[in-house]
Structure formats: C-alpha cells, structure tokens
Amino acid sequence: MDLTTYERLVKTENAARNYLLGFCFENHQRFCPRCGTRKLYRLADDRRRCASCRYTFQDFSGRWINRGNLTAGQWLRLIKLFELELSVRKIAQQLRLSYNAAYNAAHTIRSAILAHSADGDLFLGGEVEVDESYFGGKRKGKRGRGAAGKVPVFGILEREGRVFVEVVPTTRAKDVLALTVKKVRRGSIVYTDRYKVYDALMFCGYRHLRVDHGKYFSRGRVYINGLEGFWSYAKERIMKYHGVSPKRFPFYLKELEFRYNHRKEDLFPLITKCLCNLVPKHD
Ligand SMILES: [Zn+2]
C-alpha cells in the first residue's frame, strides 16, 4: 500500500476502524463470531448480543486484533512497520509503546499468519524441489543432517511458485515423505539431492530426479530460484532475531513462508486480513 492511501487510513481512528471492520465483516454485515447467526440485538457501548446463542460481543471480539488493547490506528501503524521488517525495539520507539506491548503485538501478527497458513490447503505441483535444512543451535560442531541442538525443517518449493516449510520431528523417511504426499500433487516432478530418504518418492506417484541444486542456485542473494536460496534467505532473516526460542521458531518460519509466497503482492492488506480473522478455538 502506498503512503498516501495509508495516511488516509490512519488519519482518524474512525477511518482505521472502518478499514479493519471491512475485513471482519463482508459488506459490514455483522454476524455472531461464535455461531454465525445474523440476527443480533444492539446493546449499549456498541455491543451486540446474538439472538441464537446469546453471546455478547463487540466488533473485534474473538479476533486476533482484539488482543493487546491497541486502538485500530495503532494496529494499522504496527502492521505497516511489521511489513517493513522493523525490529520490535524500533516499533516500540516509533509507536511509543512499551517493548512488551510491541513484542506481543508482533507475536500476535505471527500467530495470525501461522493460523492462516494452517487453515489454507496449500497444494504444490509441477516442478517441485524438496529438501531439509537445520536451523539454530551452536554454530560450531557437526554440520548438516543430524546436527545436534538444531531444529530440522522440511521444505517444498514449487519452481517459480510457492514454498511450504515446516518444523519436523526428524528428517527420517516417515516424516518427510508423509508431508510430501500431503502437499505435492501426484504426477509432479520432484527434485531432491542424493539423500537416501527420498529414494522412495518414485513409489509415491512422483517422477523423482536427483540433482545437486547447491551448484546452480547459489548466486548471491537471489533467493527466488530454488529451495537452497530460500534456506539462506530464511537463515539470514532469523539470524537478525538473536536467540529465537525453539517454541517461537515455527512462528518466524511461517512468517518467512508467508512473505515469500506473497512476494509479488501488497503485504499490508494481506497481514490485516489475517489479523481480522477469528482466532481458532485451540489458540
Ligand atoms: Zn451466536
């Protein structure tokens, strides 16, 4: 989103609120966030009560943006700075929030993105690269597969298309093949390196080709051509956040997947839309 449009949105709290409401309720038609009923009673202070399940709610009840006590204008500013990849410390300074408030808001954005990607049925196909990598842990010591203290991540990348990455318990066949079968259309061409685990792919309905993709994708910072490139982009980004805990790591990983998959789109409305979604029950 360009700055002129953005400035109009954050000019008044009302404008900001209306923009958010547009993502929460199609055509601003309110419904009960619990049961979906449209028959509602208006109460005082902009609250409504569902005629069916009796749930009392406000405009943002049950949604990610309801967390953290921020105004609509503060949220939109936060989204802009998050989109521009500012650190939490800088976001806090710019918005005159406490470090904790900014940190929690950034985590809410990542949680909304994670929930959004778990919700979608991302199917990859055509020419696909499959590979695993290790994140974090001590820099020295054993490298590569099976390195101690590192988080194994499995990735699938559609050439010229989207990427799917996920933390896996191990990089054994049962874990990585199950995910491949779940996410990649049968009949696709799957490129892997020479790791033995992938030998079974041809029995799963794929054309399996082994390549040494390290060789021809390692051109500096160009990361849109292949999974090797995505790994280095992701590692560079995660290095900036010193000491991401293993618990929080999947949130950062999914943020990078999201940024990559929408690299040609305007991120601002996309992030806003995620934040306006209802929080799934288990969160
Ligand atoms: Zn209801």
Image (cartoon, grey):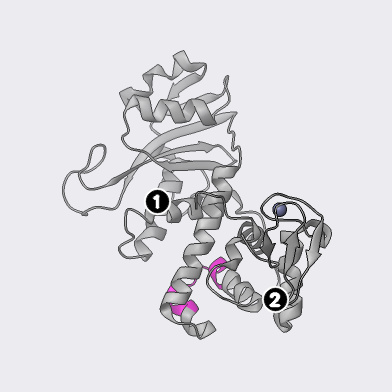
Q: Can you say whether 264 is above or below 2 in the image?
A: above
- Which quarter shows the N terminus? bottom right
Q: Is residue 85 left or right of residue 153?
A: right
- In the picture, the disc for residue 116 is none
Q: Of 274 and 86, which appears nearest the observer?
A: 274
Query: What secondary structure do most residues of the magenta stretch adopt?
Result: helix
Residue 52 relative to residue 81: left or right? right
Q: Provide the secondary structure element on which disc 1 rests.
A: helix
Label pair 2/1, CB-CB below 8 angstroms: no
| Magenta stretch contains residue 232 | no
Q: Residue at x 50, y 59 (%)?
A: 110
The residue located at (59%, 67%) in the rendering is: 66
Residue 159 position (above or below residue 151): above
Secondary structure of the residue carrying numbered label 2: helix
Q: Nearer the viewer, residue 122 or 48?
A: 48
Task: In the rendered structure, find residue 232 and report the number of the disc placed on it.
Answer: 1
Describe residue 249's horizontal placement relative to residue 205 as left or right: left
Where is residue 104 drawn, in percent x and y? Answer: 46, 69
- Residue at the (32%, 58%) spot, across then down: 245
Magenta stretch?
81-91
Residue picked out by circle 2: 3
Amino acid on which the number 2 mark rests in the picture? Leu
Residue 38 at what x, y percent from top left?
Answer: 80, 54
**Where is residue 102 drawn, in percent x and y?**
47, 75
